Image: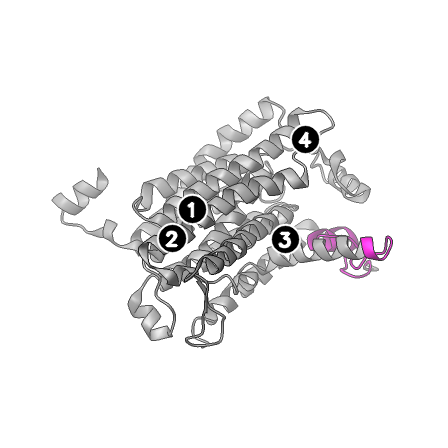
């Protein structure tokens, strides 16, 4: 209705501009998350959907969380964050864009997987939620189908540049994967690893008040810029990049992601009134991975989302080394944010003790911001 009134009758063509709709998506996502947040938190509290820190893998972490007053804080707040993200995307994005449609399916699907995981933790006595295998299976089905749909779309339309990978630093270099069945299969596997890996990276980062939401907001903003640039033939021609038609529309969804995360951060900043839970962290991370696939920044994604990938890497290294060494550890505790928050150091405890949670979060936000800005600088480095 607004489009008809402003465009056809008032002669204002604002809705044709992606930059305008992207900015409005940021504001709308922020506003909807604020509107939904208060009632959602009240509902979660009334139904006693609260965090149980006693289920933590570390006794030290559980004790620290109890001392910090986190016991009983409502969780599953990611549900209203994802609702704000989906509503904003439906309001401001073109729904004839295949990247947007698949992005909506991905967010809703991973949100459902995370919701089931959180629901089992909170309602079944003694349950730790979905097992690792069950959670990976859910991600395999959702992310695998979405990436396979992208490969099929590229094959049917002949847009094989959607299935190419572009290493940074090199002008005109690409790894083409879409001209035969074998290459398309490789792309689906790589695409699934990108989406599922980023989803789990953000999931692991969700451990301190405001950390996951802030880092996702910064990485999402950078990826929105990448999507916009890759969808502009004039900009890609100037920068020596591959033009990806319709990719620019994903920058509007990126704006919705940034705004929704900002609105959630209003309630999740220290001391958090609500925690995100898997119902928020998995779809947010999955969307970051999807935007990287659309904008052909798969190989730059570890830099764009440096903090979540560092958290994921530290956890993986700690587990592997612990098993191979018979109980020894590389880091004082994994993931990284707990090493600084609980021990004050990464490889050995600090003599001055733990670092306050707010200090750790703000410092990691700064690292995430610098990494995102550095990744954008790579647009010009070819």
Q: CA distance from mark 1 to mark 3?
A: 28 Å
Q: CA distance from mark 4 to mark 3?
A: 21 Å
Q: Is residue 221 left or right of residue 94?
A: right
Q: Judging from the image, what secondary structure is the residue with disc 2 in?
A: helix
Seen as rendered, the residue at the extreme right is 326
Residue interval drawn in magenta: 323-349
Q: Judging from the image, what secondary structure is the residue with disc 1 in?
A: helix
**First along the sequence among labels 1 and 3:** 1
Label 3 near label 2: C-beta < 8 Å? no
Q: CA distance from mark 2 to mark 3?
A: 28 Å
Dominant SS type (magenta) = loop
- Which x, y percent locates residue 125? 72, 24
**First along the sequence among labels 4 and 3:** 4
Residue 325 visible from this viewpoint = yes
Nearer the camera: disc 1 or disc 4: 1
> Are there few (<14), some (14-19), or many (20+) residues within 10 Å of tag 1?
many
Residue occupied by mark 3 = 361
**First along the sequence among labels 1 and 4:** 4
Q: CA distance from mark 1 to mark 2?
A: 9 Å
- Which mark identifies residue 192? none
The residue sitting at 79% across, 59% down in the picture is: 330
Residue occupied by mark 1 = 103
Label 2 near label 1: C-beta < 8 Å? yes
Residue occupied by mark 2 = 250
Q: Look at the image and say whether residue 352 sits in the magenta stretch.
A: no
Nearer the camera: disc 1 or disc 3: 1
Q: Nearer the viewer, residue 180 or 6?
A: 180
**First along the sequence among labels 4 and 2:** 4
- Which x, y percent locates residue 5? 17, 41
Label 2 near label 4: C-beta < 8 Å? no
Q: Judging from the image, what secondary structure is the residue with disc 3 in?
A: helix
């Amino acid at each position: 209705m607004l489009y008809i009134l402003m465009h056809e009758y008032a002669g204002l063509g604002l809705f044709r501009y992606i930059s305008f709709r992207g900015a409005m998506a940021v504001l709308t996502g922020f506003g909807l998350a604020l509107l939904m947040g208060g009632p959602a938190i009240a509902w979660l509290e009334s139904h006693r959907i609260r965090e149980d820190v006693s289920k933590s893998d570390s006794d030290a972490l559980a004790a620290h969380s109890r001392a910090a007053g986190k016991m009983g804080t409502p969780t599953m707040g990611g549900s209203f964050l994802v609702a704000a993200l989906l509503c904003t995307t439906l309001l401001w994005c073109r729904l004839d864009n295949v990247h947007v449609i698949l992005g909506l399916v991905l967010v809703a699907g991973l949100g459902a997987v995370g919701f089931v995981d959180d629901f089992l933790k909170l309602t079944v006595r003694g349950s730790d939620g979905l097992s690792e295998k069950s959670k990976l299976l859910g991600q395999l089905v959702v992310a695998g189908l979405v990436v396979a749909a992208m490969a099929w779309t590229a094959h049917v339309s002949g847009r094989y540049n959607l299935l190419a990978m572009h290493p940074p630093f090199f002008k005109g270099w690409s790894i083409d994967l879409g001209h035969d069945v074998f290459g398309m299969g490789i792309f689906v596997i790589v695409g699934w690893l990108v989406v599922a890996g980023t989803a789990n990276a953000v999931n692991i980062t969700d451990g301190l008040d405001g950390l996951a939401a802030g880092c996702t907001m910064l990485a999402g903003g950078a990826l929105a810029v990448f999507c916009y640039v890759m969808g502009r033939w004039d900009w890609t021609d100037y920068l020596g990049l591959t033009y990806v038609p319709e990719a620019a529309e994903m920058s509007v969804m990126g704006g919705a992601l940034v705004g929704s995360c900002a609105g959630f951060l209003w309630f999740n900043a220290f001391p958090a009134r609500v925690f995100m839970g898997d119902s928020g962290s998995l779809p947010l991370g999955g969307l970051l991975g999807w935007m990287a696939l659309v904008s052909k920044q798969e190989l730059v994604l570890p830099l764009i989302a440096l903090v979540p990938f560092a958290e994921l890497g530290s956890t993986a290294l700690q587990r592997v080394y612990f098993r191979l060494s018979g109980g020894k550890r590389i880091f004082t505790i994994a993931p990284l944010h707990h090493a600084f928050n609980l021990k004050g150091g990464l490889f050995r405890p600090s003599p001055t003790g733990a670092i306050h949670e707010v200090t750790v979060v703000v410092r990691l936000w700064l690292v995430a911001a610098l990494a995102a800005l550095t990744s954008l600088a790579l647009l010009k480095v070819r």
